[in-house]
Amino acid sequence: MDAKRVYGNTEGLKPICRLETLAISGGAFSTRSIKRVGGASLNLYRQGKQALFPTRLYSLKPPIAKGSGKPLLRRALLSYITSPFMLLSDDPSNARFSNTGLARTISEVLHDLGYVVDVVEYNDTRFKPRHKYDLFIGHGGNNFELIARALPRTCVKIYFSTGSYWKFSNDLELARLAYLYQRRGVHLRPDRLITKSEEWANANATGIIALGSPYVRESYAKFPHVINVNNAMYQDSQYDVKRKDYARGQNSFLFFAGAGNIHKGLDLLLDAFSSLDQQLYVCQTLSPEFARVYNRELTECANIHNVGHISLRSQTFYDLVNTCNFAILPSCGEGQPGSVIDCMQYGIIPVLSKESNLDTDGFGVTLNECTVEEIMSVVQDLASRPIQWQRDMAAKTRKITLAEYSKDVFYRNFRRALLEICERADARAQTEAS
């Protein structure tokens, strides 16, 4: 299958270098070679089934110092997600920058700065460092402390955040559940509550790099060195935006989101659109409990279309891009929603909560309170705007997205943030030594 034909422009998806796989913990291992995007191969070592938690460490081959013919000696450890490094070439996840491209681009930045890069799963609590690392980038509260305490004092330790400060994020989700109970008298379980404390990681990190707008940085206000960077998308050059019929999508809104029905605000949209004439296309996996509570809205409202999970750049996705002029996401907490950024490159106008942490100034709408009443008012107002206004706003959305949310921009921003934290750490070390 031709990945470029199926997923559009795959520029930036090729392997950044050859990968070597190292088995760190004991146990029986099996190996197989799998084809990756760009034609390279990766030897994947899997721990035996008797292991409760497989440990995998993916190591990027070190770069060669100019003129010396010898590999550079600096080493970095990234504790995030490992799946992007073993995807088959026709896997739909290759089209997603968030989170596939995030892991690959962070590794690319480190590699280009001269580090040997090791990647381990962020929730692997059995991993124990066996190298002297100069730099550690960790995510979440599962293994950050375990790894950081085992590293040299001189190692720069960076926390990579894909959302707001964890306690703030939890408070926002609990508030949404309370609002649901206020409206419906129904208790549903939290669907994206952070249960592993990130406090030690945040407090002991040399610095924090957070996805999102300055609003997400404000949630980390009590920590001294926080830098926010925009999320990104892989550009799709195959879609022809000039052929879109904006009159067709004037009243249509796309809800395209990852896991968490309450967290992402689907309950608010269903309560709002069930009293509206505008069309809502729901592209998300529903929990059974949520589907039971909202069965009437999902099955009996003619203007609410339960599409279900779809893959980016599938035919169904392109059909919805042509059908909808707006992407709406009243989420209670994001780093920046990759699903919406992906839609924005096609000129889909974003309608977002403030907590989505994406600045819509000049090209979209930010909801102030995310009440059902506010959503109804904004939807009716946007649908009533002239077709030319919607077309112009779509063009502006696309232009800003390509300029500020590309993979190359993320690469530069992350590199700049990383170097700033490392330079501050070096300056502090020199001061302490003098």
Image: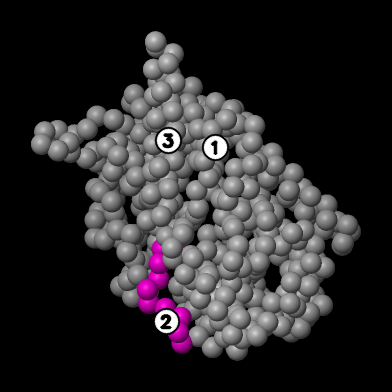
Q: State the mark number for residue 413.
A: none
In this rendering, which labeled residue sits more in front, label 2 or label 3? 3
Q: Label 2, on which residue? A: 240
Q: State the mark number for residue 226.
A: 1
At horizontal 68% and vertical 82% (from top left) the residue drawn is 385
Dot 2 surroundings within 10 Å: few (below 14), some, or many (20 or more)?
few
**Disc 1 and disc 3: Cα gap in Å?**
11 Å
Q: Residue 169 in magenta?
A: no
At horizontal 34% and vertical 24% (from top left) the residue drawn is 132
Residue 304: x %, y % from top left: 71, 78
**Disc 1 and disc 2: Cα gap in Å?**
39 Å
State the residue in front, 89 or 360: 360
Q: Label 3, on which residue? A: 420
Dot 3 surroundings within 10 Å: few (below 14), some, or many (20 or more)?
some
Looking at the image, residue 115 lies above or below residue 268: above
Image-quadrant location for residue 184: bottom right
Identify residue type, mark 1: Val
Residue 107: x %, y % from top left: 36, 45
Q: Main secondary structure of the magenta part?
A: loop
State the residue in front, 62 or 67: 67
**Disc 2 and disc 3: Cα gap in Å?**
39 Å
